[in-house]
Amino acid sequence: MAKSVRYVVLVEVNEIWSTLPYRIQCGANVTLKKLVEASVELMFQLDIIGCPEGRYGLYCDKDCVCKNGARCHGFNGACECRPGWRGRACDIPWPEVVIVASPGDSVVKYIGTNLTLACLAPHIHVVNMTWIYKAENDYNDYDTKVVNLLDDTKEKGVVQNNSINFKPILESANGEYICVVQRVDGKAVNATFVLNATTCPPNYYGEVCNQKCDCQYGVTCDRWEGCLCPPGRHGDRCEHTCTPGSFGLNCSRICNCQNNASCDPVNGTCFCAEGQSGEFCEKPENKQVVVIVLASVIPALVILVGCIVKVTLVRRRGLETKYTEVDTEMDTLSSWEIDNVDITFEHMIGQGEFGHVVRGRLRVPAGYQVLVAAKSIRPDRMTASAARDFRREMDILARIHEDKEGHPNVVKFYGVLTKSEPQYIVVEYATNEELRRYLWSLREEYKVTGQRRLLERLGFASGVASGLSELARLKIVHRDIAARNVVISDRKVAKIADFGLSRDVYMSSGYERTNQGGEEELLPLKWMAMESLRDGVYTCESDVWSYGVLLWEIASFGEEPRYAGGPMHPDVCTLLELLRKGVRLQQPENCPLSVYRIIRSCWIVDPSKRPTPEDLLQKIDQLMPRRDAAHLVNHNI
């Protein structure tokens, strides 16, 4: 028996500076004694464990000075003091009350996991320790009128000595937990912990996050629906492909392929068998070689030229008819024509790539003046689509205001100026600008005061839903429901605005350039429904999808939507693919679950299953107590 031969490869590592695991791979071609060439490759990993206890520095050659169990930073030696200690070396006693959460390895607290809150009062002679719970609700930050003392009968948490145990965390437990310590001198000291658990741990879903997803093929696990299967797959874990003859989301669509053709389970494309052709493989493939003689070509060319001439004439007549319709629309606007002497223009208040808005004063028939906003197209940027949208907005506003009163949640229309250049659309002037900017101001206020003003924001959502209901009644599709296209009046009333010109007046990162029929347009992709992105279809149901994004904006204090796993500004194909996979905008921080459920209901793939504007109005109003808007604003609720 031949003796085994051992070869030793020595690798010398002089210096490695790293705070992360370090993988080393090396190789060499060597010649053995019997002139046999071989390739040797070695791979190993160094795990950086840091300096030994009590040491720090680049070479772990310095002594830590931290005391009383403080943690020493591995690079600079800074001390992270435990509760009750301060100072450079954590050697100064510091009386305080602190709440320590364990496990504390994550800032995010998940529903369905365990949590312990421990109240510590180092260096304090404690006479009494009390826990106070302030429940979070849908109307204000916390219910400060009713304060519940926790005891072992409450479902929120169980008090044991100085700690509260959640086994597990439930969403109903969200709120403020205050530990109040009474000192021997009679003074009270407290500490507060805010619990805001709104999501499940990764790979879990359900009301209490106790169901496991285990989705296959990298599918997203949704908090409420579990695995969101892409088109072509179904099953609890998306483990099955569509059965033959079906395709699409949830395999709910029927293939139309004929003659035993196979069907793509994702999009329903038919793969024809040999000898078949056509979109649905419905006709035999023509493999005959046709010989065309010159005598047959000439008549065909004559017929073709005749067809082209006929199509051109028909198209020209169509254009003439179209312009006739526009002229008719302009005739219907004659009653809305404003006399130039009745309006005075002041300064510009908004400008975009294709148009601008100026503030003005209009003398109304009652004899007094009102502030107005006059919108027009820039003469140097006049395009067919801009003119079309401008005329469309005129017509829609006139239809909404047929009774001269309009709707309280649609921007008030005063009239048009069409007998001079540039032409203007004149609407009411909103002192508080657009909803998006108003939400930004509320966000800054929240950072200072902690007041979420949720009732006020829900009031805006209710107003937009009411205006959207009126548009649906009139069979008007807005196509661009978004916070940037809602204005806030001086009475804090939300009003839908910008029927067709919004993408020209307000240049925003919310719009992406796309080419429609050879003409470049700006489209609000992240606000558009799936059917609008895919097929260019705009309906009242697609407006409801956009309303869901607007409600998300309201809940997030005006943040710009961003889909997880996608870029900030996706193109049509990227966004459509994300939506097909079931990706949706995530629940904003501090957004009540009841509000997010309404938001998600607007993003159902099947348009017929989405709520109507009336349904949305009813659901939102159910979240609000019977109070007038002035009361809500004055009391910062």
Image (spheres, rainbow, N blue to C red):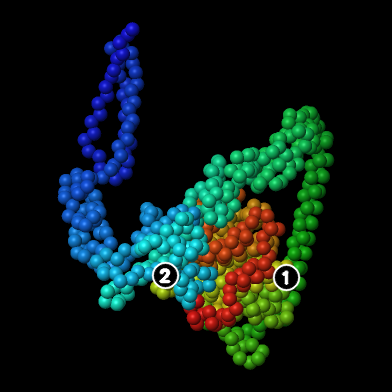
Asked if the residues shown at circle 2 and circle 1 are in contact, with their CB atoms under 8 angstroms apart, the answer is no
* Numbered circles on residues, count: 2
Q: Position of residue 526 (x, y in %)?
A: 56, 58
Marking on residue 291: none
Q: In the image shown, does 486 or 422 lie closer to the viewer?
A: 486
Work out whether 611 lies above or below 293: below
Q: Position of residue 260 (x, y in %)?
A: 76, 33
Spot the residue most to the top.
1
Residue 79 visible at all: yes
Work out whether 507 lies above or below 271: below
Q: Which structural element holds mark 2? A: strand
For the residue marked with disc 2, what is the amino acid?
Answer: Ile
For the residue marked with disc 1, what is the amino acid?
Answer: Arg
Marking on residue 473: 1
* Residue denoted by label 2: 132
Q: In the image shown, does 397 or 613 lie closer to the viewer?
A: 613
